[in-house]
């Protein structure tokens, strides 16, 4: 996008096990920056020594990504305490200076209001305000405090959707920060297509025809409505198969997976709902490419990574009727109310009976245009943050 030295931007590692959407966001961003904006940004990933080595290694394998491992980036409470009490996370600042960082990208981290670097804060969504009952009082307070602290600190704010922008304006009406909406798009690297999709199906003993639901098993992701829809279909004599993957752990509700598992057994859905747990990312794409459709029944999303990935391969989508899903798919998906199991069952039946097993799909030609726009939008945001916040910090 121009002749200049690349900006060194600090990112912190996001655990895929704890937040697959955040991990995939950064991974896809790094790939997009390398492919479409080479020389504009050099991502520097800061990780703690206890972060999963295979996750960090996968990101380090993306061209132009530099990895720095430091104890200061273990996800402990001490950094936040320092950031709040002293106004700055000193260990993080020392690491940023040693790595010659130009701009910091804050995602689910707060490094303090006195952080001496231009900073972009990513607010992925406002679930804690829209669905407060899913959070403990402490978790809700901590998340909202983090957002308010970042706003008060003058961060440039990154949002992924216009739906999130409407929420931001509703919940923080006095905000005067620079705000940018940069819509995420996905172009997975060729290295993730090495596995033969049909060998992956055989590895997990899966049928050749199935729907795919790659969401963490968290209550707001709304797996419950899929269980209910499958039970309705079984009553109609239609055996539909849904394959799910993602983390089985929700720290907010540790027993949720067990309750779902009991329902599956008591309702006789063992062969209809197959949950694989966490699987390699290459296997996720293999299943996505061969599914008859992707299901996302979520009650809330800031911007759905799984929907973007489905769009990249031309996979049909069956989605809850939340605003962001309409924004992402332009009304081209099949939609159902978040509590309307009968409508979901009808959609699943129609797709199931109208399609046979799928030949593995390839990326669509329009992917490049969408991902290039994503990368260029991120570069503009980072440059603007550096220019505006840098001027404030130098007093000019």
Image: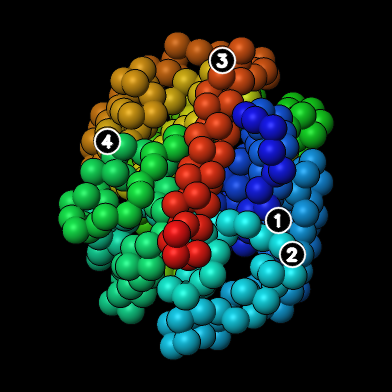
Question: Horizontal and vertical percent for residue 334?
Answer: 34, 23
Where is mark 3, residue-wise? Answer: 366
The dot on residue 44 is 1
Q: Tell us which disc is closer to us: 4 or 2.
A: 2
Answer whether labels 3 and 1 touch (C-beta < 8 Å). no
The residue positioned 45% from the left and 35% from the top of the image is 183
Q: Earlier in the sequence, mark 2 or mark 3?
A: 2
Q: In this view, does 225 lie above or below 147?
A: above
Circle 2 crowding by C-alpha within 10 Å: few under 14, some 14–19, many from 20: some
Mark pair 3, 4: CA separation? 23 Å
Q: Which of 390 and 227 is in front in this view?
A: 390
Taking the image as shown, residue 245 lies to the left or right of residue 343, namely right
Answer whether labels 2 and 1 touch (C-beta < 8 Å). yes
Circle 3 crowding by C-alpha within 10 Å: few under 14, some 14–19, many from 20: few
Q: Earlier in the sequence, mark 1 or mark 4?
A: 1
Mark pair 2, 3: CA separation? 37 Å
The residue positioned 51% from the left and 79% from the top of the image is 88
Question: Horizontal and vertical percent for residue 139?
Answer: 36, 74
């Amino acid at each position: 996008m121009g002749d200049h030295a690349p900006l060194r931007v600090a990112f912190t590692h996001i655990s895929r096990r704890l937040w697959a959407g955040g991990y995939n966001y950064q991974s896809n961003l790094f790939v997009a920056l390398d492919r479409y904006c080479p020389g504009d940004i050099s991502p520097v990933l800061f990780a703690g020594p206890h972060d999963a080595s295979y996750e960090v290694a996968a990101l380090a394998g993306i061209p132009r990504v530099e990895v720095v491992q430091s104890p200061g980036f273990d996800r402990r409470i001490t950094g936040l305490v320092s950031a709040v009490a002293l106004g700055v996370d000193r260990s993080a600042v020392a690491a940023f200076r040693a790595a010659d960082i130009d701009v910091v990208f804050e995602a689910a981290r707060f490094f303090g209001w006195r952080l001496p670097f231009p900073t972009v804060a990513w607010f992925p969504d406002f679930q804690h305000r829209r669905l407060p009952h899913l959070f403990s009082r402490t978790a809700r307070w901590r998340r909202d405090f983090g957002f308010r602290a970042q706003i008060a600190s003058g961060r440039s704010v990154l949002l992924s959707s216009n739906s999130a922008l409407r929420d931001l304006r509703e919940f923080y009406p006095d905000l005067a920060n620079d705000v940018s909406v940069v819509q995420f798009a996905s172009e997975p690297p060729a290295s993730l297509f090495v596995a033969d999709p049909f060998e992956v199906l055989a590895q997990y003993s899966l049928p050749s025809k199935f729907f795919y639901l790659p969401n963490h098993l968290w209550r707001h992701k709304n797996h419950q409505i899929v269980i209910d829809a499958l039970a309705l279909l079984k009553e109609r004599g239609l055996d539909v198969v849904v394959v799910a993957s993602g983390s089985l752990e929700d720290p907010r509700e540790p027993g949720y997976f067990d309750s779902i598992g009991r329902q599956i057994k008591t309702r006789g859905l063992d062969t209809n709902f197959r949950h694989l747990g966490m699987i390699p990312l290459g296997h996720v794409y293999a299943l996505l490419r061969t599914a008859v459709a992707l299901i996302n029944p979520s009650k809330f999303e800031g911007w759905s990574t799984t929907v973007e990935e489905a769009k990249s391969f031309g996979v049909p989508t069956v989605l809850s009727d939340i605003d962001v899903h309409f924004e992402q798919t332009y009304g081209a998906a099949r939609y159902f109310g978040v509590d309307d199991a009968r409508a979901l069952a009808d959609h699943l039946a129609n797709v199931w009976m109208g399609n046979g097993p799928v030949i593995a799909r390839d990326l669509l030609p329009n992917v490049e245009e969408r991902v290039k726009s994503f990368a260029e939008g991120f570069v503009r945001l980072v440059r603007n943050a550096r220019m505006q916040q840098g001027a404030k910090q130098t007093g000019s």
